[in-house]
Image (cartoon, rainbow, N blue to C red):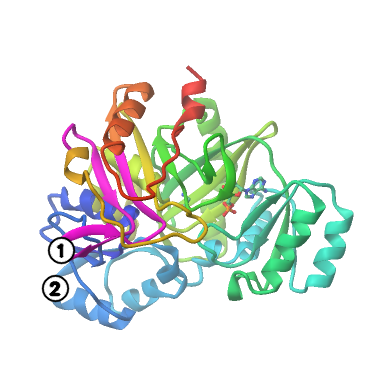
Amino acid sequence: MNALVVGGGGREHTLAWKLKQSEKIATVYCAPGNPGMAGIECIEIGDFEALADFAQTHDVGLTVVGPEAPLCAGLVDVFRARGLAVFGPDKHAAQLEGSKRFAKDFMVRHGIPTAAARSFTEAGPAIDYLHQVEMPVVVKADGLAAGKGVTVAATREEAIAAATACFDGAFGEAGAEVVVEECLIGEEASILAFVDGKTIKPLASSQDHKPIGDGDTGPNTGGMGAYSPAPVVDEALWAQIDELVLQPFLRGVQEDGLDFRGIIYAGVMVTAEGPKVLEFNVRFGDPETQAVLPRMTGDLAEAMLACIEQRLADYDFEWSDDTAVCVVLASGGYPGPYEQGKQIDGLAAAETNGAMVFHAGTKRVDGQIVTAGGRVLGVTALGPDIRTAVHRSYEAADKISWEGVYKRRDIAHRALDRL
Ligand code: AMP
Ligand code: GLY
């Protein structure tokens, strides 16, 4: 059979690369894909019905949806209605990511520890509330905002400005409802788990780096780098996460009758009181995937098919003992305005020592690869320990250049600090 990956960023590049290794899969298609995808058939296809037509006429036995937007817009529903095997939640269940209030209600209903929160649909009451609560607080646009709809506000002025911006349309419809949340203190970890409605099984742990600047300073981005495993998630914490987050999540899916056969990503804050969930995403993390999947030794297509067919109980994930580090290269100015179309040099050189370059925002113009997004590339290297993996990934990433290229220099600093 063939496989189809929907999306075209670094996460989808990694998914396509890993599916390509599967013995079950002949051809991997990616819609739209990107110019870095060697051996993958990139296709340009418009709407969900046209994609489903393509899947039916091209022997696609497994479709994987990378980004949240098509999941929230109901791609899975269209495919399932035609009997196509697709990995991901349906439109209703995708609200666990698409609406922060839906997710919060789910967590409260099923006893999953999370920050206390209130949600508002009008500026007046939100601002009144922000005058009363203690700072810091976290202000979030309710809907999808590409990781940028969250402000951790140290002062009342900042909090009010953030809420006002949401209601004034800074995030369009996504900001029509605003969630104000208690600020949790601790170290974050990304917990990804496959769920088939009967069983939940975690993948290897990882950690992202959301702020743009070294030392976790500056505005939040989609993620500037990742590594796996995250040593903060030791055996004792895994046991707590299983008991307090994963099992209640599975029970919640069952009790609420959600059609969730895909991956759940819990952004977890490890607080002094134990793990608390910051948010759910209903898809693979980006860039966490670029660090996690290179460590997976088993067959990803097999795992996904087991999940879709509710046989996940019979599938065992296996992981390399190596550590993986992914460094993201971004356009200068990101997450604010940035220029595009810069010629990228050094791509081939970067891959000479076993490092992998996953494309996130590139395009091919006159045979040259140029920048075409905020996050442009992810460079992943493996090593027997975190120090070696960090060294190898920066050695490779530093071979790549374009005018204005930016990267954080401290990916994995929390793991290194633990040594
Ligand atoms: P989210 O998109 O909800 O994951 O938020 C993006 C980032 O904002 C998270 O990865 C955290 O770094 C931060 N954040 C979100 N909610 C909270 C919270 N309640 N307390 C502290 N930091 C938060
Ligand atoms: N790395 C954060 C995310 O995928 O949402």
Identify the image quadrant of the N terminus. Answer: bottom left
How many angstroms separate mark 1 from mark 2 (CA)?
7 Å
Q: Quadrant of residue 370?
A: bottom left
Element at badge 2?
Answer: loop
Q: Which residue is mark 1?
A: 2
x%, y% of residue 255? 57, 61
Residue at x-position 67% and y-position 57%: 109
Q: How crowded is the residue under tag 2: few (<14 C-alpha within 10 Å), some, or many (20+)?
A: some
Q: Cβ–Cβ below 8 Å for labels 1 and 2? A: yes
Q: Residue 295 vs residue 241: left or right?
A: left
Can residue 295 be seen here? The reply is no
Q: Quadrant of residue 382?
A: top left
x%, y% of residue 73? 45, 75
Q: In the image, is residue 258 above or below residue 386?
A: below
Q: Residue 1 vs residue 314: left or right?
A: left
x%, y% of residue 153? 72, 50
Residue at x-position 62% and y-position 56%: 150
Q: Residue 400 vs residue 91: left or right?
A: left
Amino acid type, label 2: His
Q: Which residue is mark 2?
A: 58
Q: Looking at this view, is 219 or 205 the one in front?
A: 219
Can you name the residue that lies furthest to the top here? 419
Range covered by the magenta-colored residues? 351-380
Amino acid type, label 1: Asn
Q: Quadrant of residue 129?
A: bottom right
Q: Looking at this view, is 176 or 213 the one in front?
A: 213
Residue 359 shown in magenta: yes
Task: Identify the mark nearer the N-term, 1 or 2.
Answer: 1
Residue 371 shown in magenta: yes
Q: In the image, is residue 286 above or below residue 323?
A: below
Q: How crowded is the residue under tag 1: few (<14 C-alpha within 10 Å), some, or many (20+)?
A: some
Magenta: predominant secondary structure element?
strand
